[in-house]
Structure formats: C-alpha cells, structure tokens
Image (spheres, grey):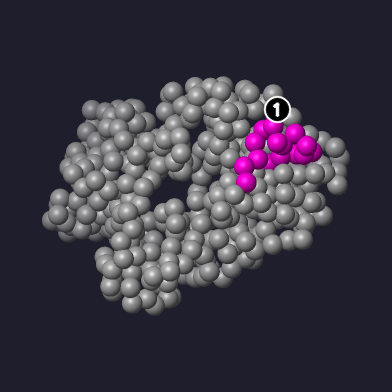
Amino acid sequence: MKKIAVIGAGFSGAVIAHEAAKAGYQLEVFDARPHVAGNCHTERDAETNVMVHAYGPHIFHTSNEKVWNYIRQFDEFMPFVNRVKTITGGRVFSLPINLLTINQFFGKTFNPREAEAFLASIGDQSIKDPQTFEEQALRFVGRELYEAFFKGYTTKQWGMHPSELPASILRRLPVRFNYDDNYYASTYQGMPRNGYTAIVEKMLDHPNITVHLNTRLGRSDAAGYDHVFYSGPIDAWFNYSEGRLGYRTLDFAAERHEGDYQGNPVINYGDEAVPYTRISEHKHFSPWESHDKTLIFKEYSRYCEENDTPYYPIRLAREKSQLRQYIEKARQERNITFVGRLGTYRYLDMHVTIAEALDVAERFLASAPRGEAMPTFMVDPLG
C-alpha cells in the first residue's frame, strides 16, 4: 500500500482521506492549526453556549444531490434558509435585491413585469459591454441601487473601488423580480446539527487515518511519501519563490449580549462610513436551539498579511500572473495533487470543495492500483 500524506484537514483533505482510508490505504493528515475543519471550524462559546462559526458564517447549500447525500452521512442537517438583510442610508432592506427591495427602496408597488421594465429604464444603456463591477451595476440596476447596495459594501470588502474590479464578481449576485428572499438558489440548504467540525472529525475517525494537528508538513518533509494531497496555499509549497499571492482576510470583533441582538443571522452594512461589512449573530444559525445570551461578530475585511488567515483570493491581473508561475512550477513536481481553495487559488463554496475532493479520491482509487500517475490539478486553477 502507498504511503500517503494529506496536508490540510479541511473538507478537501478530510474527504480524500476518508475515501482512501475506506479503500484500505493508510494516510497521515497534517494541519498547522490546533483543530480540524479549516475555515469551516465550529465550536461552542464557553459563555453563551452558542455554536460559533469561528471563521465567519458557513451555510451549506448545493444543487448537487450526490454531495447533499454524501455530507448527510456525517450529521443530521437541520432546515435553514439564509435570509440576509442590509442596512443602507438608515433603512433596512432584503437581499439579494428582489421585488420587495425594489418596491421598498423606490416607494412603489411594482409587479414583476413593471419592476423589470423600471430597472431597464434606470440602467445606463450607454454601457454596452460592462468590463468593471461598477459598469455592470450601473448597466443593470442603475446608479441609486448601485450606490446603496454595492458601492460601499464592495469597497470595504475588497479594499478597492468597484471600478477596479472585474464585472464577473457582480454577475454572481442575482436580481429577482419576485419576493423570494432566500439568499441562495440551491436545491438543498441546511445546517449541521452538531457543527462542521463534528462532521470533519467523523470523516477522519478511521483506523487507517492518523491526524497530526499543530504540525506543518512542507515540501522537503513530504519527500518520503508516495503521494501527497496538498490543500495548503500553493505559494507556500514553493516557499513564496514568486512572491505571495494576494488574499483578503477578515477580522472579527466579538460581542456578547443578553437576548436577541439583531433578529437575523446576517445583516450587511452598505454604507462606506460604517467600517465593518456585516454583523453575524451566531445563535440564529442554529434556530432549533434556545439561548438566553447571544454572541455577535462584527466583520472587517482587509488585505491578508504574512501571519493572517487567508480567506478570499483576489485573482486580479497581478495575482493571476503570479499564479501562472506557480502552476508551471507545480506541474514539474511529482506525486502531488493540489486541491481545494488554497491549493488551487480559487474561491470555492463548501459543496464545490466536497464535489471536487470526491472526484480526486475517485480518480486516485482508480489510478493507483494500475500504477498511473495522478494529475497535479484535477481542475485548471486558471479555468
């Protein structure tokens, strides 16, 4: 049997390790942090007993039935619909922009057809081929909605003016001409009863898996393994030889209060004058539980420095140029597969991470017995 190392105990590493262990392989899983589950880590707050999403909110949603059935092997998923609110200009609105948002904002009673026609009339029709985030917003929702809901929030989230960001970022944000305020359009959505860390712990609880926490395994240390599945930062693997890839990181200011602080899991703050992007109230992520006290996180976004936790890959022109250099280096390596958000420098939702990890495991279990080499990347990081 091959000697296999899995670097990173988030969902990518845990799924691959679990599937390979079931097939009889022996694996060692390494993570530099003192816990498993990566940025999905959840834990009970000692003072309030609220289940806390330690690295910010994670709501599981997917339209992939295979992934939905897979993840539910490890915990019961409770009903949960993410209904986000935003405060802008001293008023509260529903997100994503929907028929209620439009009618509230403009003081109208539009039906779907009228609302669609109205947005078309206030959009900047002179912008034929939007290239930037700002142009995309002005073209499709007009200046008033852009400045209320997107301009300030985006500037805080990305640390740059929306005119400096590509239009592709905004294309992921829907506008609905009905009263549906479910933030996601996915077929399945829910929250694990016991949190995400409990799921990953179950995945890794196998006699063929040895877990090493608080342990970094670098490129030189991995030479003794027949294969490495690496979900750490791709630039770190090469000791940042081409410079550090750019990420945004998040700071959380925790506050504890009595009762209910804001009445909703997530409220965004669209005004640039408010320094935080949103407030998350964690007990509302577990509505089946009851707590007298509450815990909130005020969330601040900034550029990721050397000792920070990376969250969102920036992926603008400079970063993509660096990434190409790292990809070329990676493809010269042997017996390593780069996986996950950090390993491929892509923003991935949990369900996509799990789906890709299952594909990697399936490919490995098919190719290893035949002595076939695993690809360096199962998904093109620049695709």
Q: Is residue 302 magenta?
A: no
* Left or right, residue 133 beside residue 3: left
Q: Residues within 10 Å of mark 1 (few under 14, many from 20)?
A: few
Answer whether residue 133 is visible to the viewer in this image: yes
Q: x, y (%) of residue 376? A: 68, 33
Residue 329 drawn above or below residue 229: above
Q: Residue at x 44, y 23 (%)?
A: 318
Q: Residue at x 63, y 23 (%)?
A: 329
- Residue 124 quadrant: top left
Q: Secondary structure at mark 1?
A: loop
Answer whether residue 117 is visible to the viewer in this image: no
Q: Residue at x 65, y 36 (%)?
A: 218
Residue that badge 1 annotates: 333
The magenta segment: 215-229
Q: Residue at x 43, y 69 (%)?
A: 46
Q: Nearer the viewer, residue 339 or 187?
A: 339
